[in-house]
Amino acid sequence: MTTPPIPSLDDPATDPLDVARAAAEALAAATGVERHDVALVLGSGWGGAADLLGETVAEVPSTDLPGFTAAAVVGHAGTLRSVRIAGTDGAPDRHALVLGSRTHLYEGRGVRRVAHGVRTAAAAGCRTVVLTNGCGGLDPSWGPGTPVLVSDHINLTATSPLEGATFVDLTDLYSSRLRAVAREIDPGLPEGVYVQFPGPHYETPAEVAMAGRLGGHLVGMSTTLEAIAARHVGLEVLGISLVTNLAAGIGDEPLSHAEVLEAGRAAGPRISDLLAQIVRRL
């Protein structure tokens, strides 16, 4: 019996949701976990949360699954992990799908690959996704290491993960219910509007000033396209940013990826514990 070929995201005639379903089937076979409940996309600084959630059941290289590619950014893990979260007060155990590797738009691999992780999470059974990132902050009071809840976004990438006449309501895209859950853990969590630029260059001071005038509080190069795709496939979205530096023109220091990594390392234990506590409540 001949096995049918796996559909390719690079084929314009392929429905990207078919590739997500194929990836979810391969994930279930590789992990032995038939269904996952919550997904986490871990950006710069957030990687330690996976170790605090519970028992890692399996870890799969992203390149072993249809549609996924190797991580292209230092500080991102190229694996997907299945983590068992122990139930409490008689509740059953749950499984978290931890995506340590995300594809950024600036990698030039196409917006389908940017959205593939969250689409696979939905096909694997998840109903909730937590999108994290490292970003620049426009509020001088949010120093490096400050976690900020994403309340809304401005997409300046000039693209969308949706194709054709696909109309999706983005009202309350970043769930107010989930933000309230996060504040049960830390009532002092601030919130702000995340502005995605295409990258990979950092924003100019004038672009940062523009983002502020548009209503933005955070600037970065990820998250918004994933959030749109997540809403399309029915996922409830919680977004959390880690301010790794003051955005260009807000602070006096030059921007560098090394600075982003260092801020993530310094804040890692604290924000990882925070995120793990939040996810256990979701």
Image: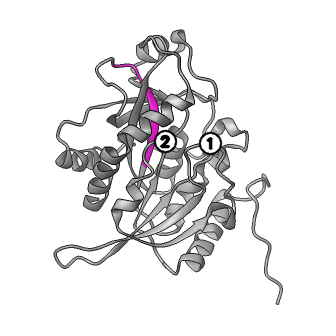
Q: Which amino acid does label 2 sit on?
A: Ser
Most common secondary structure along the magenta stretch: strand
Residue sitting at x 63%, y 61%: 62
Q: Name the residue under label 2.
A: 44
- What x and y, as percent, mark residue 219? 47, 26
**37 displayed left or right of 5:** left
Extent of the magenta region: 131-139
Which type of secondary structure does the marked residue at label 1 adopt?
loop
Q: What residue type is labelled 1?
A: Val
Please tell me whether residue 132 belongs to the stretch shown in magenta: yes
**116 displayed left or right of 215:** right
Coloring applied to the structure: one colour
Residue sitting at x 80%, y 55%: 11
Residue sitting at x 39%, y 61%: 51
Q: Mark 1 points at which residue?
A: 73
Which type of secondary structure does the marked residue at label 2 adopt?
loop
Marks 1 and 2, Cα distance to the nearest angstrom? 9 Å
| Quadrant in the picture for the N terminus | bottom right
Residue 211 shows in this picture: yes
Q: In which quarter of the image is residue 18?
A: bottom right
| Quadrant in the picture for the C terminus | bottom left
Q: Quadrant of residue 85?
A: bottom left
Residue with the most extreme right position? 2
**Mark 1 near mark 2, Cβ–Cβ under 8 Å?**
yes
Residue sitting at x 17%, y 48%: 184
Please tell me whether residue 12 belongs to the stretch shown in magenta: no
